[in-house]
Image (spheres, rainbow, N blue to C red):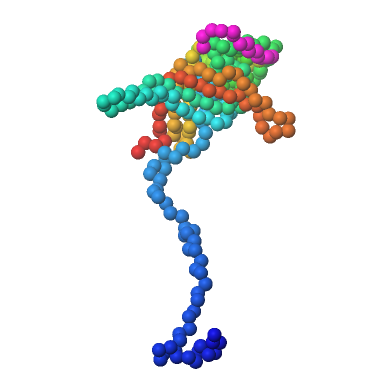
Amino acid sequence: MFGAAALGSIPYAGLPLTPVVVLPPSEPTSPSSSSMSQTSIQKLAAIRKGSVKVQVGDDFSSLVDIGALRNPVFTAVVENQEIIFDNVDSLKKFVNGNKVEFSFDLAEINLTNMAKLDAGLVTLTTQAASPVSITDELHTLAADSAVRLNFKNGANTRVASIAVNAAGGGASKAEGTDYEVIVDAEGYTSLAKIGTGTLAVEVDYTYTPLASKTITLSASGNKTLKAMRITNTDENGKVFKIDIQDVTNLSAISIKFASDTAQDVALQAVQMKGTLVEIVDEQQVT
């Protein structure tokens, strides 16, 4: 064997040996940290933000907002069918194409609304409290615009003993001549001015609140079907609206109560099923 010094001095075929440089293994190449888009947003207005308002009523002219909820999900329940043949392509069919479901967890455990969601199964009764007199309640009435009185009857009926005077101790005003009275879909007695302009008034009336509400469940029977509207409103006031008719709750009444120490509330699981009337979109129209 030759030492390193000897190798450097021995010619090979008349040529000196060339030193060999061994490089360390190269590091694997890391992927680029910059992101790459596969496409771009096609219709920005078609990206929906926010939750929904849910209303239920006997029909679409008497809808009532049922309030706070979580996890709203709209689902079509069409049943797709495929009929197979031995000698031709299969036949694709469907049934119940207009049947839909809307599920959510209701946070406002309101017995009145429970009776609407499960009408036919649930019967609501109320116990009236003592009447309460209101004097000199200030309002400004306008033509063709109903103004609610501050308090309502628990039975959602017209309040009693309505007396209307011009504000500041002015003259008495007559129903049917100076103003008209209506009861709106949520049971509030409301006033509207007859004629043009506005009128500042003081209103006296008597209302009867409820002392309690009670529901009972029927052993058997038929459901009473309702109307439902689901509405998402964007920052421009434009709506994405779903109307469903002949709707009822398929979920058995179930209320999940929260712990005393939890930062949460009781929830009622609801699964409404009915027939789709229409979906209307004012938000994305191009």
Residue that appears at 26% across and 25% down: 87
- Residue reaching furthest front? 1
Please state if 286 lies on the left or on the right of 73 as rendered: left
- Residue reaching furthest right? 260
Q: Quadrant of residue 123?
A: top right
Task: Name the quadrant of the N terminus.
Answer: bottom right
Q: Is residue 257 visible?
A: yes
Report the number of discs.
0
| Position in image of residue 50 (x %, y %) | 51, 36
Between residue 137 and residue 61, name the one nearer to us.
Answer: 61
Task: Name the quadrant of the C terminus.
Answer: top left
Residue that appears at 55% across and 27% down: 104
| Position in image of residue 128 (x %, y %) | 67, 11
**Residue 212 forms part of the magenta stretch:** yes
| Position in image of residue 84 (x %, y %) | 32, 24
Between residue 286 and residue 88, name the one nearer to us.
Answer: 88
| Position in image of residue 280 (x %, y %) | 40, 29
Residue that appears at 62% across and 21% down: 254
Whether residue 66 is situated above or below residue 154 in the rendered picture: below
**Residue 16 forms part of the magenta stretch:** no
Between residue 189 and residue 241, name the one nearer to us.
Answer: 241
- Residue reaching furthest left? 87
Residue that appears at 42% across and 51% down: 37
Whether residue 176 is situated above or below residue 107 in the rendered picture: above
Q: Is residue 98 visible?
A: no
Q: Quadrant of residue 17?
A: bottom left
Between residue 82 and residue 154, name the one nearer to us.
Answer: 82
Whether residue 251 is situated above or below residue 32 in the rendered picture: above
The magenta span reads 210-223
